[in-house]
Image (tube, rainbow, N blue to C red):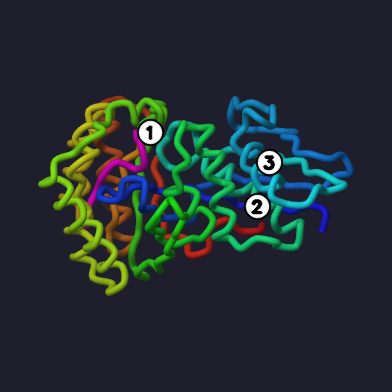
Amino acid sequence: MKEIKLFCPATIANLSCGFDVLGLCLDNAGDEMIVRKVDQKGVRITKIAGADLPLETEKNVSGVAALAMLETLDELDFGFEIEIYKNIKAGSGIGSSAASSAGAVFGINELLGRPYSRKDLVQFAMQGEKLASGNAHADNVAPALLGGFTLVRSYAPLDIIRIDSPEELYATVVHPQIELKTSDARSVLKQNVSLKSAIMQWGNVGGLIAGLYTKDYDLIGRSLHDEIVEPLRSVLIPGFDQIKQTALENGALGSGISGSGPSIFALSRGKNTADQIAKAMSEVYEKMNLPYEIHVSKINPDGVRIL
């Protein structure tokens, strides 16, 4: 096999209570990528469509992730070309950089005969995230590669647990058309939190994980509460409080900031409810005359996939 075409999915990170440790994979929003084996050594980004991003390998998240992976292998007498077709806007809060990072390492791994497992690939994709945000976090790249929900139990050593999604769980994500860089969204966070807030957050993380395993939709909803990050970041997102309240009034189990924002997610039971939430969210931004994109998606069980 000399060439592979991939779907590189969007993701929702943090999921309110799980800053930097929880994420899920979306099913119908994502980029496409072509990875090709070529005679010339190294990694080259030959085409990017849909976004103004650098072609230089060391300045592109997919290139950096690919190089991190190749450094661990015996020197190859061939190389790789990558074409990226971006459908996820940068700074949208649904894992644009993660999709590119995950796709690159997955594609090269396939062309090399899978020397690494999908879980192994997370450590390399994290290097693309480090370039994008200054922090090598895994809460987007892990679900992008593994599918379903993922929990990063530890970063040192890296320990990731994949969790199946309850069948009827849907995500609705609205992206107001402003860009909010992850690095800027991180700059508003406090380095210390109160013990009271931490205890509440630990309880919600445990509740959310328990709810996923037991398919207890009400418990999932009760656990989608952010005591620490959302109060600081929500002020950066136009209409956040109104969008969240609207989602809850229309049947959402819970709602919060997707990743670092500005996208806002809601989880719900069943597609009809998810569609109703999407309609209600849309009306809020239409009244504000703010352009937006909206996605309604099942939870993707597979992660990056071959097209």
Q: Between label 3 and label 2, give the one nearer the viewer.
A: 3
Q: Callout 3, which amino acid?
A: Leu
Q: Which mark is residue 292?
A: 1
Determine the CA span between mark 3 and mark 2: 19 Å
The mark that comes first in sequence, 2 or 1, is 2
Q: Callout 1, which amino acid?
A: Tyr
Helix or strand or loop: what does disc 3 sit on? helix
Q: Between label 1 and label 3, give the one nearer the viewer.
A: 3
Q: Is there CB contact under 8 Å for labels 1 and 3?
A: no
The mark that comes first in sequence, 1 or 3, is 3
Q: Is residue 8 above or below residue 161?
A: above
Q: Classify residue 162 as left or right of residue 185.
A: right
Helix or strand or loop: what does disc 1 sit on? strand
Q: Callout 2, which amino acid?
A: Leu
Q: Which mark is residue 67?
A: 3
Q: Which mark is residue 6?
A: 2
Residue drawn at the location 26% of the way across and 48% of the way down = 16
Find the magenta span and give its range: 253-262
Q: Quadrant of residue 284?
A: top left
